[in-house]
Image: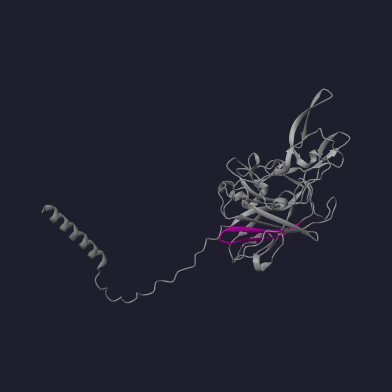
Amino acid sequence: MKKLVLTASLCLAIALIFASIACEGDQGLKGPQGPDGEPGDDAMLTPPRDRVFALAIFNGTQRDHNGANAATLTFDTTASPSSSVVVANKIDEVPVIDGVFEGADVWGENSSNLTLEHQAFADNYIYEAKVIASYDDHNMYFMVQWSEVSQGKYEVGENNRHRDWSFDPDTGVFVVNDVYEDRVALMFQDSETLLDQWKIYGCLNGCHVGEGLPDNMLSPSASISIDTWQWGAMRAEKLEMGMDRALSSIGFVEDGGVAAIHQNLVEIQRIVDEQTIFDTIPIYMHVKQIEDPEFQPDDILWDYYATPYSDTLSWTDDSYIPGWYAMSPSAGNDVLKSAGQFSAGTWTVEFSRPRVTEDPFDVEF
């Protein structure tokens, strides 16, 4: 009897649960629509803050450069471009970074012809550069354009080799060629302690503190670094990546991680006539040069073609070894894109970089 009562109670409970789930009452009438809310604004990332930057242009030499020590970059759309002021453009279309200027329809209307001055060592006679700065919600873009001048030791032409190696049959060793690429550098800094001097003197105060010479380029203190974007006609052009470095109180330092390009050079000791001398040799050569010492590799030696340099091969005066080797960079070392084109005596170089990166040396826009 008790089992029968329990069974009946259980069945009744289950039936009530199903009834409560399956059965709903009639819904009431829909109420009137409420009033419209306040109109909203389109989502927009805040424009970057104004800053002062420095510009340096090299014409196929190691040290000689002309530039602008302290140029103003402003995001104030009411400002006017001038020989020392660059007004940034807010753009919708992403420029192609290939060294071919796509015009104001892509880059924006504002452009500046910056006045350049002789900086150190020899004057390279480049006194003006066209600069355009543009930005979108994600990236900053720069275009720098200048014409070379034929005067003195300078000739109008594309210098796209940089410190490579040639074999000297008289001495039986490879020697580094004193050839240098055309290149341009942009420099930015964020330190509040240097800001007032940087606004006035720029690179004269922040870069050339070691007696004003490029060989002694240093930042003023250990707490200050100067973010440097550099394009080179050989080094950056072959990789389509700019050289992203920071100038510190001990000189230039690479952004953290593995950089894309490295100089193919190591210092060694030799015994000559019972005297110890210091010398330099290549670190790597192209793997095809093992069988053919006269094989002519490209200007940059990629790591998958590289093999340790050997001084026992039958090198000739036609033998050549690249002065730089490249490898895949680590994340963060590939964010600065750059490319350049030389046409009718004029270089057009373009850069792009995310406005914000994870590298502590990179300035934020």
Q: Quadrant of residue 315?
A: top right
- Residue 212 visible? The answer is no
Q: Up-down: is 271 above or below 34?
A: above
Is 139 a magenta residue?
Answer: yes
Image position, residue 358 (x, y; %): 55, 49
As rendered, which of 256 and 16 lies closer to the eye? 16
Depth check: give the residue in front, 70 or 65: 65
Which residue does the image show at 85% across and 34% down from the upper left? 172
**Magenta stretch holds residue 352:** no
164 or 203: nearer the eye?
164
Locate the C terminus and report the quarter of the image it occupies.
bottom right
Return the x and y of residue 228 as percentages of the image width and height: 65, 49
Where is the N terminus found, in terms of image quarters? bottom left
Determine the main secondary structure of the stretch shown in magenta.
strand
- Percent position of residue 167, x then y: 84, 39
Is residue 94 in view from this perspective? Answer: yes
The range drawn in magenta is 127-144
Q: Could you say which is closer to the camera, residue 347 or residue 187?
A: 347
Question: Which residue is most to the right?
Answer: 170
Marks counted in the figure total 0
Given the current orientation, which residue lies at the most extreme left position? 1
Q: x and y percent of residue 67 in the render?
A: 72, 53
Q: Residue at x 59, y 40 (%)?
A: 222
The colour mode here is: one colour
